[in-house]
Image (cartoon, rainbow, N blue to C red):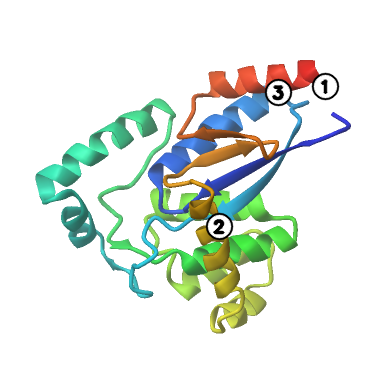
Amino acid sequence: MTNPIKLDIMSDPICPWCYIGKTHLDKALAEHPGHPFRIEWHPFQLNPDMPREGMDRRDYLEGKFGGKEGAVRAYAPVVEHAKAAGLQIDFEGMKRTPNTLDAHRLIHWAGIEGRQTAAVAALFDAYFVQARDIGDHDVLADIADGIEMDAAVVRKLLQSDADEKDIRDRDAHSRAMGVNSVPTFVVANKHAVPGAQPPELWAKVIAELTAAA
């Protein structure tokens, strides 16, 4: 299409619904190669108060959901929807819940180089499939290298406070605009679409936008 339509996505790399939502969106986009979207990813931390070093994942989940049974109940729909989307998530292998501020900084820097969606995909894969700690600077530098960014530059930036305030301000802006859960998709700066929507919904949105254009 000659006039691309902005699709802003508020997301967090440790959010399983964001991973599922991206998978559904990707399926719809692949089936509609002439889709109108120009995608930009925006930071939203599920746990903005998480210690910078992260914490034990079991302790985090049981604290958040009121014990082991509560955590299992809360994650049952995630497991079901992930499986339906064809995703293999290594929940057993995931030992830590990281602070995602540095992961969001990597997504921001990747965006400057036109590799933002690649960074998001690589972070999801590292965390959910490979069960890596995406709060760790070595892991983030390795992810950067895997998407053809300069790992040495990324490592140096991570050791500074570069763009930390920007990430926090953008997160706060989304919350001030009424975003309180992720993923949240905003179509053409007007229409908010919350949650991990199925490919069929995106197919319908794409058809409506294409017809309107």
Question: Residue under circle 1?
Answer: 213
- 103 up-or-down from 179: above or below: below
Q: Please indicate whether residue 109 sits to the left or right of residue 178 in the image.
A: right
Numbered tag placed on residue 173 in the rendering: 2
Density class for disc 1 (Cα within 10 Å; few <14, some 14-19, many ≥20) is few
Q: Residue at x 60, y 55 (%)?
A: 119
Question: Residue under circle 3?
Answer: 32
The number of numbered discs placed on residues in the rendered structure image is 3
Displayed quadrant of residue 204: top right
Q: Which comes before the other along the chain, label 2 or label 1?
A: 2
Q: Residue at x 60, y 82 (%)?
A: 156
Q: Residue at x 67, y 61 (%)?
A: 110
Instruction: Label 1: state its secondary structure.
Output: loop
Instruction: Label 2: state its secondary structure.
Output: helix
Residue 37 in the image: x percent, y percent?
A: 72, 35
Instruction: Label 3: state its secondary structure.
Output: loop
